[in-house]
């Protein structure tokens, strides 16, 4: 989240976090006398299952499992939140992200679509080709209807940043359709929707987003030119999308969605604190949970910056929306392992600052839930959905003392806190004399766009893939020799992993998956300085395929949710959040999502009879995830086969590569066909009351099982 080309490009500097102030939060919760929640704000929000509100909270890198067995996990150290979810609902601990990370995670969780249908296919940043095969940078974070965001200048690709594919089975055409906006399903049902820092539903930058929403010659654009810092605080990071006729957006501007299924006219929105504050907090600037005015680092009231959306700030903004006519609120909360106070970079597990921030996070959630209860917003009438975008791995030296627990008097310290930075350009030049030009999405899962946009079978692409597959480095943290690329995917496997979207200019030549510690980037075309080195600042790695980086968690509480405490069994991924949420609130999208309703964790009474838990339907849903999820067995087996293919062959004999790739293409076509039928059957049962007969369920399950067996055979042959 904090690398060049990420949200930090648009974010302002962090404001000071109030650390460890349980008493202050308690006093605020008791003495603030917040306004009783206005459920309507001039509109009628029609939801099902007795639900009046939806509160969705998306963490950045907050862990359910322990990073060190001696140290309580992030969620363990937030008992006000974890106990609330476990006592009133269920935490699914076998949830998974979509590859690669962050931007893809947010958008997939919000829409229920895999990244190949939204064009946010890599992470926070990417590259793309122009018509001549030249490469240019792109940033995933831009407002929903913005054009492609190229921070280097005018984009050479005129498609939407969120470019949509309605049907992944069709060949990509680059027809430039906008991804359906997730808030429209709610606003069409009469519900105002508030967004606090949630990806792409708010203005993310003042470069392309201001002219997109306000106009190139607007007063807001003039403010950007005159005072960009104040414009950032005024317009970024917050939005309210209103139902028709809502008084909350009486002074708002048209909320334009050019390609929304079913049309979208007559709706208004508020964009940024400058527009939202007068509508929901007319007495003055919006305050945090602890009562402080929310400002940026320069003291401008308004949006504090994405990296400053600590629970005190983020949940304070969410509470104000919920209390003033915005019954559906989605809030982003920044990670707890970055030093939000001293700006020193990342903490290691059990460090004093990390423990203090987790205590502050816990206190803020206690204050928020108490305040919501005071407002009558509880699990009796509110659906709470809480999750994280990704997992990550701490890269650093062993802690001192070795048995530190993070408890007072036994805090951990670290001599080194750093990922292992790998200069891929230097390694290729030094070990193979290869100076082929390429653009790179720097990451533990680096993606390469080779200059000239060569075909996947070209000698240039195949030689570079073999070389990258052969590279290794000495890990300065462990002393072990690590492969730079444990796994490899070119466009054939990238399509299986949902990396090939409707805009063909964004498809990488190939993607590699490194080890837990390595962060693969570019650099000088030599290794005169070490090509594998530690630095400082970033110590949490995410993006490659390891259990700690891809396994996340999902908490559900409220009407219709079973009280299971912790569900360690049900395999889910981020595309399942959307259909599960909509099934509970009694709404449906006007587009076909890729996820499934997690019926194992919902009460039968909250579901139509056609979707109630039976062994056949549960089995069908589980098989569907295994053939579709980025970490399902189909993807993992085909990726193993892809790696063997890309590492194989010579300049004169590439027959093994061709054979495996042909088999992968055939498996991919089979997967798309059977997945389309299973997905349609499950969604039809959930939202159209269409019964899945036992015979149909058995036949579809058999097809899926045969497909999984074929992929496993290819991986192991």
Image (spheres, rainbow, N blue to C red):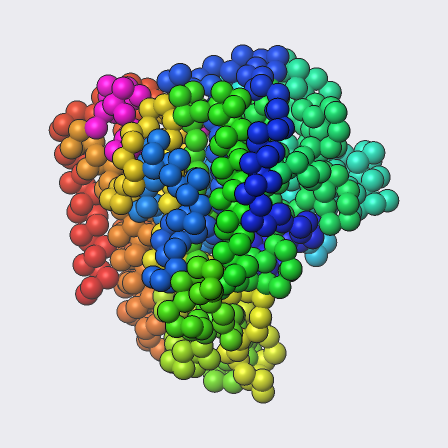
Q: Could you tell me residue 140's position as x and y percent?
A: 58, 48
| Secondary structure mostly taken by the magenta-highlighted segment of the chain | loop
Q: Residue at x 61, y 34 (%)?
A: 28
The residue segment tinted magenta is 591-613
In this view, the residue farthest toward the right is 226
| Depicted 62 relative to depicted 41: above or below | below
Above or below residue 640? Residue 326 is above
Q: Horizontal placement of 251 versus 368: left or right?
A: right
Residue 405 belongs to magenta span = no
Q: Quadrant of the C terminus?
A: bottom left
Q: Is residue 441 left or right of residue 462?
A: right
The image quadrant of residue 109 is top left
Query: Is residue 382 among the parts visible in the rendering?
Result: yes
Q: Nearer the viewer, residue 179 or 386?
A: 386
Q: Which of the pair 56/627 is nearer the observer?
A: 56
Q: What's the residue at 47%, 83% (across, down)?
A: 432
Q: Residue at x 58, y 84 (%)?
A: 529
- Residue 593 appears in view: no
């Amino acid at each position: 989240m904090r690398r060049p080309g990420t949200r930090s490009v648009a974010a302002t500097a962090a404001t000071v976090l109030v650390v460890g102030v349980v008493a202050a939060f308690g006093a605020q919760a008791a003495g603030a006398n917040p306004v009783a929640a206005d459920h309507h704000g001039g509109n009628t929000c029609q939801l099902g299952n007795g639900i009046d509100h939806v509160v969705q909270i998306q963490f950045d890198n907050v862990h359910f499992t322990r990073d060190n067995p001696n140290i309580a996990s992030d969620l363990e150290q937030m008992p006000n939140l974890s106990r609330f979810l476990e006592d009133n609902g269920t935490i699914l601990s076998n949830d998974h992200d979509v590859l690669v990370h962050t931007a893809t995670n947010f958008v997939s969780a919000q829409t229920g679509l895999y990244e190949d249908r939204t064009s946010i296919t890599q992470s926070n940043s990417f590259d793309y080709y122009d018509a001549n095969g030249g490469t240019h940078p792109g940033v995933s974070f831009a407002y929903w209807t913005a054009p492609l965001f190229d921070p280097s200048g005018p984009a050479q690709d005129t498609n939407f940043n969120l470019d949509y594919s309605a049907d992944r089975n069709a060949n990509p055409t680059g027809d430039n359709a906008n991804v359906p906006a997730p808030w429209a399903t709610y606003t069409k049902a009469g519900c105002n929707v508030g967004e606090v820092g949630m990806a792409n539903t708010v203005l993310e930058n003042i470069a392309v987003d201001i002219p997109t929403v306000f106009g190139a010659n607007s007063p807001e654009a003039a403010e950007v030119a005159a005072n960009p810092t104040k414009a950032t605080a005024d317009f970024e990071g917050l939005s309210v999308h209103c139902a028709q006729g809502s008084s909350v957006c009486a002074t708002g501007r048209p909320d334009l969605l050019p390609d929304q299924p079913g049309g979208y006219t007559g709706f208004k929105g508020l964009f940024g604190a400058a527009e939202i504050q007068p509508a929901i907090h007319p007495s003055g600037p919006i305050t945090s949970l602890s009562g402080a005015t929310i400002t940026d680092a320069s003291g401008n009231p308004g949006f504090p910056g994405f990296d400053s959306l600590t629970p005190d700030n983020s949940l304070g903004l969410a509470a104000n929306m919920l209390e003033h006519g915005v019954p559906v609120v989605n809030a982003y909360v920044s990670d707890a392992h970055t030093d939000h106070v001293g700006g020193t970079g990342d903490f290691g597990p059990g460090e004093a600052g990390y423990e203090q921030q987790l205590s502050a996070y816990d206190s803020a959630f206690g204050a928020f839930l108490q305040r919501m209860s005071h407002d009558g917003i509880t699990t009796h009438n509110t659906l709470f959905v809480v999750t994280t975008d990704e997992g990550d791995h701490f890269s650093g030296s062993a802690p001192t003392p070795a048995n530190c627990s993070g408890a007072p008097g036994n805090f951990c310290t670290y001599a080194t806190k750093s990922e292992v930075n790998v200069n891929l350009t230097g390694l290729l030049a030094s070990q193979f004399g290869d100076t082929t030009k390429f653009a790179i999405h720097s990451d533990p899962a680096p993606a390469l766009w080779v200059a000239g946009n060569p075909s996947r079978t070209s000698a240039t692409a195949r030689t570079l893939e073999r070389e990258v597959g052969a590279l290794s480095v000495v890990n300065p943290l462990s002393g072990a020799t690590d492969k730079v690329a444990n796994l490899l995917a070119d466009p054939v496997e990238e399509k299986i992993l949902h990396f090939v979207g409707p805009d063909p200019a964004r498809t990488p030549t190939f993607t590699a998956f490194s080890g837990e510690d390595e962060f693969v980037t570019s650099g000088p075309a030599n290794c005169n300085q070490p090509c594998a080195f530690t630095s400082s600042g970033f110590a949490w790695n995410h993006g490659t395929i390891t259990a700690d980086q891809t396994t996340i968690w999902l908490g559900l509480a409220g009407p219709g949710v079973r009280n299971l405490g912790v569900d360690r069994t049900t395999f889910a991924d981020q595309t399942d959040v959307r259909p599960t949420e909509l099934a509970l609130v009694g709404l449906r999208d006007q587009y076909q999502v890729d996820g499934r309703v997690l019926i194992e964790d919902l009460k039968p009474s909250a579901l139509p009879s056609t979707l109630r838990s039976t062994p056949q339907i549960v089995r069908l849903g589980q098989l569907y995830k295994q053939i579709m999820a980025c970490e399902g067995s189909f993807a993992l087996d085909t990726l193993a086969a892809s790696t063997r293919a890309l590492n194989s062959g010579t300049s004169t004999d590439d027959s093994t590569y061709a054979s495996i790739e042909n088999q992968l293409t055939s498996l991919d076509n089979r997967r798309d066909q059977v997945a389309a039928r299973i997905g349609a059957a499950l969604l039809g049962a959930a939202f159209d009351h269409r019964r899945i007969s036992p015979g149909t369920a058995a036949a579809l399950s058999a097809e899926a099982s045969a497909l999984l067996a074929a992929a496993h055979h290819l991986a192991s042959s």
